[in-house]
Amino acid sequence: MNKNLLSLGILLFLFSCSSSKQISKNTPQILRDFNTFLITEISTDKTYGLSPKNPVEVGGAKYSEGPINERRFLNALAGPNGEEISYFRAGSCCAVKSNNDPFGFGSVMLDDYRVTWENSKDTISIYINMYDSGKLKAPIGFTLKK
């Protein structure tokens, strides 16, 4: 009886810690021009890009285009009323799982970009993963450049 309970407990632990979510994505990105991605949607997910648990996945690190892909994403965004945004890289943070880790450890660091626009009351962090590539959308609160 105790062995069965122990076995059941171990199985529950293993399955509760696993995720059915795909770790790494490799969605191809489309360029509007050399410096800007073509993005056509605004996310409805309140955490997309605004939480390290749900970063924007721009890809490109494998081909040494990670940082430029981060800027290509940000260059496609506008403020809530179409304002020109400005941004700077505040640093790296937050390890996330990735099969595309160039060092083989299974996790990568995100980049934290601080974004603002004229007359904004605050600076907003957008978390970007340059190792994995997913469908790009503008985070809630942003619009897309025309």
Image (spheres, rainbow, N blue to C red):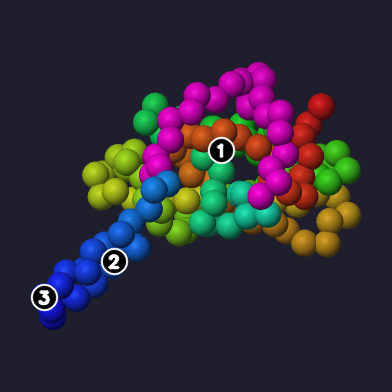
**Seen from this angle, which residue lies furthest front?**
1
Q: Are marks 2 and 3 in contact (CB under 8 Å)?
A: no
**In this rendering, position of residue 73 left or right of residue 1:** right
At 47% from the left and 51% from the top, the residue drawn is 110
| Residue pictured at 15% horizontal, 72% vertical | 4
Which of 58/84 is in front? 58
Q: Which residue lies furthest to the bottom in this view?
A: 2
Reply above or below: 94 against 99: below
Amino acid on which the number 2 mark rests in the picture: Leu
Kindly report the distance in space between the C-alpha atoms of the residues bearing marks 2 and 3. Answer: 14 Å
| Residue 15 in view in this figure | yes
For label 3, the residue is: 3
5 horizontally vs 97: left or right: left
Which of the two discs, 1 and 2, labels the residue nearer the N terminus?
Answer: 2
For label 1, the residue is 70
Residue stretch in magenta: 22-45
Quarter of the image where the N terminus is located: bottom left
Residue 19 placement (x, y as % from top left): 38, 53
Q: Which circle's residue, 2 or 3, is located before the other in the chain?
A: 3
Q: In the rendered view of the protein, which quadrant contains the C terminus?
A: top right
Of 114 and 18, which appears nearest the observer?
Answer: 18
Residue position for label 2: 12
